[in-house]
Image: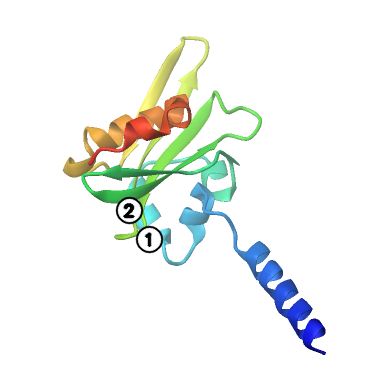
Amino acid sequence: MKRALIALALSCSVLSAHAVEPLTVSRLATDKTTADAFKTMVGSQKLPEWVTQGGTTSPNQDVVIDGHKYVVLNSCKPHDCSAQSIAVLYSPESRSLAGVFSELDEQAVNQKLTWLNISDNLSIDGKTILFAALTGSLDNHPDSFNFK
């Protein structure tokens, strides 16, 4: 009986661990605790549907800016990451969001960056981290982007 209860408890904990969805840009857009902050971040900008409906994601990174912890999230257009991508800074403490949306015009070789909800305290270091997330530099050098 004791073994059966232990097995049941373990299986429940495994199921609950799998029930938790990973934090993604689209989840920030749709989760009831962060949806309003996402709308504030986007403001009047028009973003493509894949941003809120689930783009291709990369692993999240944790960074520190001025003593505050942030999670950096990346997502890109499915099957065409080079054309459109987004990077978001999420503060679990304040539940605030800031980001950058990138569109690449491959014919003219131009990249258009649309900054989203960048406040004065994120204007330099926040933009640096967000651009590094878009380029892959944050993934390659994660310890280089903690600004205490």
Furthest residue toward bottom: 1
Instruction: Name which residue lies at 66% across and 30% down.
Output: 79
Q: Nearer the viewer, residue 34 or 17?
A: 17
Given residues 46 and 17, the one toward you in this image is 17
Report the Cα–Cα distance between label 2 and label 1.
Answer: 6 Å
Q: What type is the residue that disc 1 sits on?
A: Asp
Classed neighbour count for the residue bearing mark 1: other residues with Cα under 10 Å, few (<14), some (14–19), many (≥20): some
User: Within 10 Å of the Cα at label 2, are there few (<14), some (14-19), or many (20+) other Cα atoms?
Assistant: some
Label for residue 103? none
Q: What is the residue that sits farthest to the top in this orientation? A: 108
Residue 9 falls left or right of residue 120: right
Q: Quadrant of residue 133?
A: top left
Residue at 47 percent across and 55 percent down: it is: 28
Reading the image, the residue beneath label 1 is 36
- Check disc 2 and report the residue beneath it: 40
Is residue 11 shown above or below 76? Answer: below
Q: Amino acid at mark 2?
A: Thr
Residue under the image location 18 percent in, 43 percent down: 121
Can residue 117 be spotted in the picture?
no
Q: Quadrant of the N terminus?
A: bottom right
**Residue 11 % position (x, y):** 75, 73
Furthest toward the left, the residue is 120
Q: Are marks 2 and 1 in contact (CB under 8 Å)?
A: yes
| Position of residue 96 in the picture relative to residue 52 (left or right) | left
